[in-house]
Image (cartoon, rainbow, N blue to C red):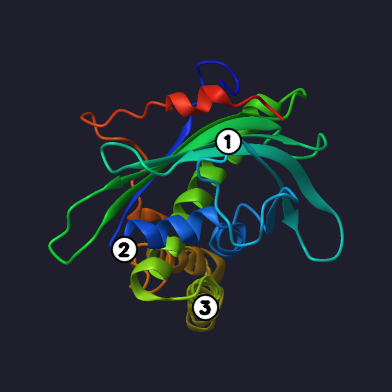
Amino acid sequence: MPAHGRSARPIYVEARIRAPMDVLWELTQVPEAHERWDARFTRIRYAEDVHEGDAPDHRGVVRFRYWLGLPVGPALTGTGVTTAERHRPDGSRISALRFAADGGLSPLQEGSGYWRYTPAGSPTGESVLFVTGYDYRGWRVPGGAWLDRWFVRPFVGWLTAWSFDRLRLWAEHGVPPERSLRRAAGEAAARVGGAAVAGALADAVTGGRAGALTGAGCALLVLLLSLLVPPSALTPAARRCARRPERARPARPPRLLDTLETP
């Protein structure tokens, strides 16, 4: 589904996760686990005829609802349909979905996407190449295409990659998504705090002399430099995920996606 013509690039993210395929399947396909690591949602629920803890697997099409917002107050909501193939001849697995927002406020009005799970040998044990590709239609208002191309789509792509690394930490190291979020918030606060201290020291040393680096300028410089410092090994980071497919592995939507209609 093209978002705004040829100028809009579909979102693509991949991560190599050293964990058994069945573990990764459960963490991504069971809604109660999925909503814990995926920052694009705060709640996901399958239709009433699907038991909690179940994942779609040769049951045809399953309907779901999703929410993004605080527990109390307004939220962005929508509906979707999903299906999956768990047992494929090459050992890979695929799930596909289509979704549609309930109202016009959501920057992702309707779209489709897939998850592809490919076994990837690792010297240390089982490993999976976990890939997503999806596209959507954004706001149909004046300036909506421009906002999507330069702000919404880059942010959603970054958030997807950050969430994938959060999932990797959970699957590989047993770091709960809630703990990794606290670590990320703590490191971000430390970077901002360090920049603020540097700015205050610069003002104190220069005394506001003309030609000297101002406190605000120093703070900004320190903050930008701090972004070059990699996060700790147990803090999620979007930079650890590939955002473009390799030439030998083109990003083609699976045929399974063609079996779904927009809800």
Mark 1 vs mark 2: which is more N-terminal?
A: 2
Question: Residue 48 vs residue 118: left or right?
Answer: right
Q: Quadrant of the C terminus?
A: top right
Amino acid type at mark 2: Ala
* Residue at (47% x, 68% y) in the render: 218
Q: Tell me how far mark 1 sits from mark 2, CA to CA.
A: 27 Å
Q: Would you name the residue on which mark 1 appears?
A: 60
Q: Would you name the residue on which mark 3 appears?
A: 179
Mark 3 vs mark 2: which is more N-terminal?
A: 2
Where in the figure is residue 163, as x and y percent of width and height?
A: 49, 57
In this view of the protein, which residue sits in the foreground, 130 or 210?
130
Q: Would you name the residue on which mark 2 appears?
A: 19
Q: Are the residues at dot 3 and dot 2 in contact (C-beta closer than 8 Å)?
A: no
* Residue at (33% x, 67% y) in the render: 230
Mark 3 vs mark 1: which is more N-terminal?
A: 1
In front: label 1 or label 2 = 1
Amino acid type at mark 1: Gly
Q: Tell me how far mark 3 sits from mark 2, CA to CA.
A: 19 Å
Q: Residue furthest right?
A: 73
Mark 1 nearby-residue class (10 Å; few <14, some 14–19, many ≥20): few
Per the image, label 2 sits on a secondary structure element best described as loop
Amino acid type at mark 3: Arg
* Residue at (26% x, 48% y) in the render: 119
Q: Tell me how far mark 3 sits from mark 1, CA to CA.
A: 35 Å
Q: Are the residues at dot 1 and dot 2 in contact (C-beta closer than 8 Å)?
A: no
Where in the figure is residue 199, as x and y percent of width and height?
A: 52, 75
In front: label 3 or label 2 = 2
Q: Image height check: is 132 above or below 25? A: above
Q: Image height check: is 118 above or below 148? A: below
